[in-house]
Image (cartoon, rainbow, N blue to C red):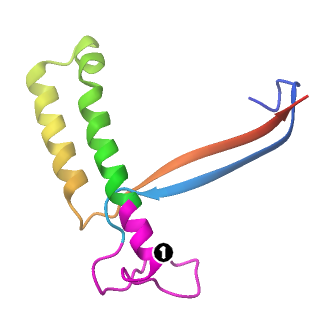
Amino acid sequence: MIKSNGTFHDIHQRDVWMPVGPSFSKGRFSRRERDRSKYLLTDTAEGRHLNFVGEFMRENVKAFIKGGKTLILGSGMSPEEYKEIEFNASLEVQDENIPMYLRLNCVTARKL
C-alpha cells in the first residue's frame, strides 16, 4: 500500500514479535528460541527484559479486551456473551503454560 503511494522511498517492513506474559520460567531454558544458537534463562539480562515486556503486554491485552466492550456490544453481541468471552480471554492471557506472542508489523519510510 505505501509502496504504491509514490511519495515515499527507502521503505522497510519487518515483523516484531513481542511476548504476552512471561517468556521464561525461573531457572528453566526456553525452547522457543529455535533460531538462536543458545537458549536463554530467565536470570539473564535478555530473559529478564523479555519477561518484563511480556508482563507489560499482558496488562495491555487485558486493557484492550475491556476497552473494546462498547464497540463489541454496539455491534450486536449480548452483554452475557461479552462477559463470558471477556472472562475466558482473561483466563487465557493469564495462563503461563500457553506461549503467546503479539506480532507488530513495522513499516518505516522517508517522504520525498
Q: Which residue: 11% across, 35% down? A: 84
Q: Which residue: 43% across, 67% down? A: 50
- Dividing the picture into quadrants, the one containing residue 77 is top left
In the image, residue 43 lies in the stretch drawn in magenta = yes
Left or right of residue 1, residue 97 in this image: left
Using the image as rendered, state which of residue 14 and residue 84 is in the foreground.
14
Q: Which residue: 34% across, 64% down? A: 99
Image coordinates for residue 67, horizontal then vertical, percent: 28, 27
Query: The residue under label 1 is which amino acid type?
Result: Glu
Image coordinates for residue 109, horizontal then vertical, percent: 79, 38
From the viewer's perspective, is residue 33 above or below residue 12? below
> Crowding at label 1, few (<14), some or many (≥20) Cα neighbours within 10 Å?
few
Magenta span of residues: 24-52
SS assignment at label 1? helix
From the viewer's perspective, is residue 102 above or below residue 50? above
In which quadrant of the rendered image does the N terminus lie?
A: top right
Left or right of residue 87, residue 38 in this image: right
From the viewer's perspective, is residue 39 above or below residue 16? below
Judging by the rendered image, the residue that carries numbered circle 1 is 46
Q: Which residue: 43% across, 82% down? A: 44
Residue most toward the front?
Answer: 45
The rendered magenta stretch, by its main secondary structure, is classed as loop
